Image (cartoon, grey):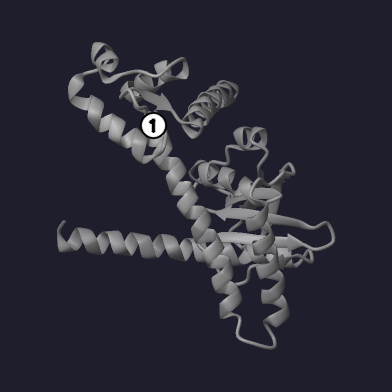
Amino acid sequence: MSRSARSTGKTWRAYKAGLEEALYKPVVSFFENQGYLTSGPKSHRIVLAYDQTNDAITAVEVKPDDARAAISQALFYKDFADFVYIAVPSHGNLRTKIIEQLGLGLLTIGNAGRVTQKLAPKRNRPTDVPLRTRLVNSIIHYKNAASQMPIEPFVNDIRDNLLKWQQDFRESLALLNIFRNDTRVNMLLPLLERPWSVSQFRRKINPKIIYENVSMFRAHRLISELQNGAYALTPAGRLALSEYFKFLERIKKLLEDEF
């Protein structure tokens, strides 16, 4: 890559970061003006707001471009948040129908920094309760300690929790990368019924890629090798494969409804 290309890339990233920062502040103010406790300084462009009265934590994915870019990440916030919003500039492609069907909320930010709620989110049932509890405690401690002691430990606690979530998110994306390949899915499908040997795979799959895919499946704990040399789905692999097909059906329905 040339020096000019690297420079252009850095300039664009800095410009985009500046846009996100400009959008982040009015979203924080939007919730604080309603009495929410927030996560304070920016934490990976996610706004966390806690409603003490109703014991509800809200997560907001802030993007400087259209809402489509934020949907996939916002969906994973449901793991730990009671309510999830997407916040984008008011002039962007809002994708309101699909956002509503996914149970997400939508905030738009005008040129003057005015935040408007376009869609109210549905309440989730967070599955990662320990992470939710840690985030709530971090926000409360951060606010209580802000005027009496350094806030860095509490901000770092929020950041560490979000980094853990992002690691889980990357692992989920790695699984999606496996399943989006037809050959790999065709190798896994027969294992829903019974274990297969390498010789059985050779009748259906190009032998050159069998061992490469087997190694990938084992690295992600999707399959295990039996004593007779055959391969079987692990419980996690069986669950991941079935959930993937449910995910495809859901996306197909959403796209049909959208277009």
The spot of residue 83 in percent (x, y) is 70, 49
What residue is shown with label 1?
224
For disc 1, the neighbor class at 10 Å (few under 14, some 14 to 19, many from 20) is: some
**Residue located 53% across and 41% down the image:** 93
What residue appears at the point 41 percent right and 25 percent down from the top-left corner? 232
Q: Is residue 150 above or below residue 221?
A: below
Q: Nearer the viewer, residue 215 or 125?
A: 215
Please state which of residues 200 and 226 is positioned toward the viewer in this rendering.
226
On the image, which quarter does residue 98 sit in? top right
Q: Quadrant of the C terminus?
A: top right
Q: Out of 160 and 99, give the one closest to the viewer.
A: 160
In the rendered image, the residue lying farthest to the left is 2
- Kind of residue sitting beneath label 1: Ser
Residue 202 appears in view: yes
Kindly tell me whether residue 45 is visible in this rendering: no
How far from the left and from the top, in percent, is residue 113? 62, 62
Residue 144 lies, in percent from the top left, at: 73, 79
Q: Secondary structure at mark 1?
A: strand
**Which residue is farthest right?**
53
Q: Quadrant of the N terminus?
A: bottom left
Residue 240 lies left or right of residue 179; in this view the side is right
Residue that appears at 65% across and 42% down: 104
Most extreme residue toward the top, as rendered? 203
- How many labels sit on residues? 1
Does residue 66 appear left or right of residue 98 in this picture? left
Q: Is residue 221 left or right of residue 198?
A: right
Q: Nearer the viewer, residue 38 or 33?
A: 38
Query: Which of the 4 image quarters holds residue 201?
Result: top left
Residue at the farthest bottom position: 148
Query: x%, y% of residue 108?
Result: 63, 51
